[in-house]
């Protein structure tokens, strides 16, 4: 496998002010790449602008970010010319890398637009995902600049130039190889991501349980109500007395949504159109061997931190609630119904 090479590429694209679907395309205006034939090599660079044919003017947002001038694009080659030159430059057996998944998506739409389907379905490794999971143990999609800084690499080139960003991506790739020996496969990244998510959920559940203990002990609920007894928890959770209550400010009827189970408590949210969000905390306790009772505390949004509700959603076990059925009206004309 002497001819194998690692190609890190980065694209810059322009957008239009779309008046129809076709005009929504992100049009590539620069292709940058850096190729390593061995991980420890300095490598070779590729950078070329692309003459726009869809959006002739640079979008004002793009103009703000990219260190290039409209006139540089007018002298550039067409997309077909530049992309063909790029793939020739890559060599016979390239392994592709990008930072994040956007570049691959934009490359594909541009290839389709110009009818160059022969280049679709490239295998592209998302180096950002590997960095996030290996180095920061996060799933937060770290920016290229933040990753360069976190790894202590030389960051003296201008960012948002496709050629420079490709060099940065290659530096990060080489540094990950130096630190970890090899890059994880996509399946290994999936497994690491699943493990991370589980850990985040467990942490959120623990933090939420602790915060709820303190809240129930210290904060003053806007409403406190006992409900039950019920034959079991499900009956309690579905009951009107646990889910419906008057808005503490205006008395309008509120109904809370699905519950998130945190330890022995259930948390849910409801909203009064006029008085904002309210948070229900339902504690269930057995009252006899086959009966349970619930205690409902309702907190206003001043007393219930938004962050706590996010933790409950992340770490809690969802108990989905149906819409409460309307209270049935007494049928006065049962005779007529039978006839119909
Ligand atoms: Zn209200």
Image: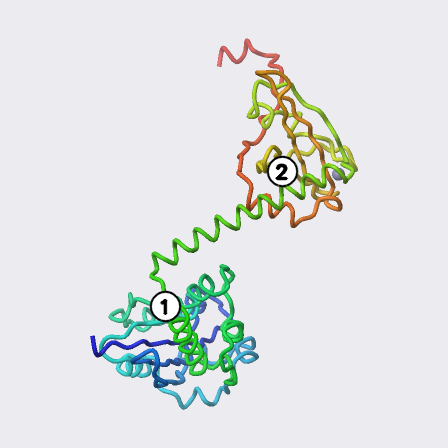
* Color encoding of the figure: rainbow
Question: Would you identify the image quadrant in which residue 4 lies?
Answer: bottom left
> Looking at mark 1, is its residue's CB closer than 8 Å to ligand 1?
no
**113 on left or right of 269:** left
> Helix, strand, or loop for circle 1?
helix
**Alpha carbon of mark 1 to alpha carbon of mark 2: how far?**
42 Å
43 shown above or below 145: below
Residue 72, percent across and down?
45, 89
Q: Which residue is mark 2?
A: 268
Few, some or many C-alpha atoms within 10 Å of disc 1 (few <14, some 14-19, many ≥20)?
A: some
Quarter, ligand 1: top right
270 shown above or below 171: above
Question: Would you identify the image quadrant in which residue 9 lies?
Answer: bottom left
Q: Which mark is residue 109?
A: 1
Question: Would you identify the image quadrant in which residue 2 lies?
Answer: bottom left
Seen as rendered, the residue at the extreme left is 1
Seen as rendered, the residue at the extreme top is 335
> Helix, strand, or loop for circle 2?
strand
- The residue lying toward the viewer, choosing from 97 and 15, is 97
- Mark 1 or mark 2: whose residue is earlier in sequence: 1
Residue 110, percent across and down?
36, 71
Few, some or many C-alpha atoms within 10 Å of disc 2 (few <14, some 14-19, many ≥20)?
A: many
**257 on left or right of 217:** left
**228 on left or right of 201:** right
- The residue lying toward the viewer, choosing from 124 and 261, is 261
262 shown above or below 238: below
Q: Which mark is residue 159?
A: none
Could you tell me if the residues under marks 1 and 2 are in contact, i.e. CB atoms within 8 Å?
Answer: no
**Going 72% across and 45% down the picture, which residue do you hit?**
301
304 shown above or below 241: below
**Going 39% across and 68% down the picture, which residue do you hit?**
180
Residue 38, percent across and down?
30, 79
């Amino acid at each position: 496998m002497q001819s194998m090479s690692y190609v890190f590429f980065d694209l810059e694209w322009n957008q239009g002010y779309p008046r129809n679907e076709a005009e929504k395309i992100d049009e590539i205006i620069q292709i940058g790449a850096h190729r390593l034939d061995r991980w420890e090599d300095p490598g070779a660079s590729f950078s070329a602008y692309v003459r726009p044919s869809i959006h002739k003017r640079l979008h004002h947002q793009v103009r703000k970010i990219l260190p290039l001038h409209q006139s540089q694009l007018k002298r550039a080659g067409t997309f077909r010319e530049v992309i063909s030159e790029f793939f020739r430059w890559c060599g016979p057996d390239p392994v592709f890398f990008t930072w994040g998944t956007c570049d691959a998506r934009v490359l594909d739409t541009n290839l389709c637009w110009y009818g160059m389907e022969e280049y679709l379905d490239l295998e592209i490794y998302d180096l950002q995902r590997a960095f996030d999971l290996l180095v920061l143990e996060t799933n937060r999609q770290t920016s290229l600049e933040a990753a360069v800084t976190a790894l202590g690499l030389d960051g003296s080139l201008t960012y948002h130039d496709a050629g420079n960003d490709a060099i940065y991506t290659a530096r990060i790739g080489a540094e990950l190889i130096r630190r970890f020996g090899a890059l994880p496969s996509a399946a290994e990244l999936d497994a690491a991501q699943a493990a991370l998510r589980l850990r985040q959920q467990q942490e959120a559940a623990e933090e939420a349980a602790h915060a709820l203990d303190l809240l129930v002990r210290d904060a003053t609920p806007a409403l406190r109500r006992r409900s039950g007894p019920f034959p079991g928890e499900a009956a309690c959770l579905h009951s009107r007395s646990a889910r419906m209550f008057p808005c503490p400010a205006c008395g309008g009827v509120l109904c809370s949504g699905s519950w998130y189970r945190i330890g022995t408590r259930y948390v849910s949210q409801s909203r009064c159109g006029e008085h904002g969000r309210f948070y229900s905390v339902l504690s269930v306790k057995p009252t006899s061997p086959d009966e349970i009772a619930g205690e409902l505390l309702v907190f206003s949004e001043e007393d219930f931190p938004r962050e706590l509700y996010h933790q409950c959603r992340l770490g809690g076990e969802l108990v989905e609630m149906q819409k409460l059925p309307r209270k049935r009206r007494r049928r006065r004309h049962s005779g007529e119904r039978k006839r119909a």
